[in-house]
């Protein structure tokens, strides 16, 4: 298993960090699994209705194929030593704007679609996958990895050493129940 130096945590493969899971690259034959796990992630977050999830599956499959073909999408599967799938996650090389300094690369690794099968939760599957992806990005010379954390995943990422950033967003249209359109602040005396 890949070694990690994230914030003093045990290294996978060390005595304290030994895990019963192995991480392997996902292949084209894992597409159904990755789509199912992505839908499971959204279902667990409770962000969308079942019909919306069903419609999103084929689009995600198409997008995943396109990005994999362009060498921008790299998924990983966690398995038990017996070969049972415990979870999966992916790194998407997200386009970035040019900037000076060490962050000048035109792609930023973005961890996404993290999912652990219910029977394997709270056993280190997510942490193992994230550490593997961080080591993967480090070996390729990247200096930063980003992600968006659900309330379920936030503690995992914080223990590994992820920090909140200053990202902001503005919703131009309603995104569904509980997601209001961002309101433009009115200037005093203006419209």
Image: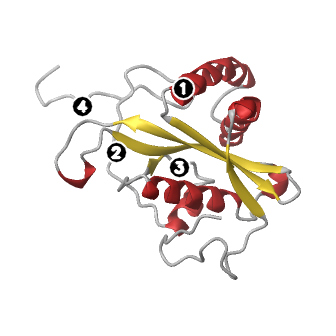
Please state, as top left, top right, bottom left or bottom right, where the N terminus lies in the image.
Answer: bottom right
What residue is disc 3 on?
149
Q: Is residue 7 above or below residue 64?
A: below
Question: Between disc 1 and disc 4, whose residue precedes?
Answer: 1
What residue is disc 1 on?
69
Element under label 4? loop
Name the side, left or right, on which 104 lies relative to 119. Answer: left
Element under label 2? loop
Q: Are marks 2 and 1 in contact (CB under 8 Å)?
A: no
Name the side, left or right, on which 84 lies relative to 134. Answer: right
Picture residue at 33% right of the left edge, 28% below the top = 183
Question: Residue 126: where, in percent of width, then height?
Answer: 66, 57
Q: Which mark is residue 185?
A: 4
Question: Which numbered disc, 3 or 1, marks the residue closer to the eye?
Answer: 1
Question: Between disc 4 and disc 3, whose residue precedes?
Answer: 3
Name the side, left or right, on which 32 lies relative to 69. Answer: right
Picture residue at 54% right of the left edge, 22% below the top = 66
| Any part of residue 115 in sight | no
Element under label 1? helix
Distance between mark 2 and mark 1 Cα atoms: 29 Å
């Amino acid at each position: 298993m890949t070694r990690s130096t994230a914030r003093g945590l045990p290294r996978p493969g060390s005595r304290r960090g030994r895990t019963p899971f192995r991480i392997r690259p996902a292949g084209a034959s894992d597409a159904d699994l990755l789509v199912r796990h992505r839908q499971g992630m959204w279902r667990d977050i409770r962000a969308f209705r079942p019909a919306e999830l069903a419609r999103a599956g084929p689009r995600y499959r198409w997008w995943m194929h396109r990005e994999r073909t362009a060498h921008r999408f790299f998924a990983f599967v966690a398995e038990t030593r017996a070969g049972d799938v415990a979870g999966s996650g992916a790194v998407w090389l997200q386009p970035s704007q040019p900037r000076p300094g060490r962050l000048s690369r035109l792609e930023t690794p973005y961890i996404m679609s993290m999912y652990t099968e219910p029977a394997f939760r709270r056993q280190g599957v997510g942490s193992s996958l994230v550490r593997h992806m961080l080591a993967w990005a480090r070996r390729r010379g990247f200096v930063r990895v980003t992600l968006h954390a659900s309330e379920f995943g936030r503690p995992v990422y914080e223990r590994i050493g992820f920090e909140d950033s200053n990202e902001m967003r503005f919703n131009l249209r309603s995104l569904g129940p509980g997601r209001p359109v961002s309101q433009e602040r009115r200037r005093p005396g203006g419209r």
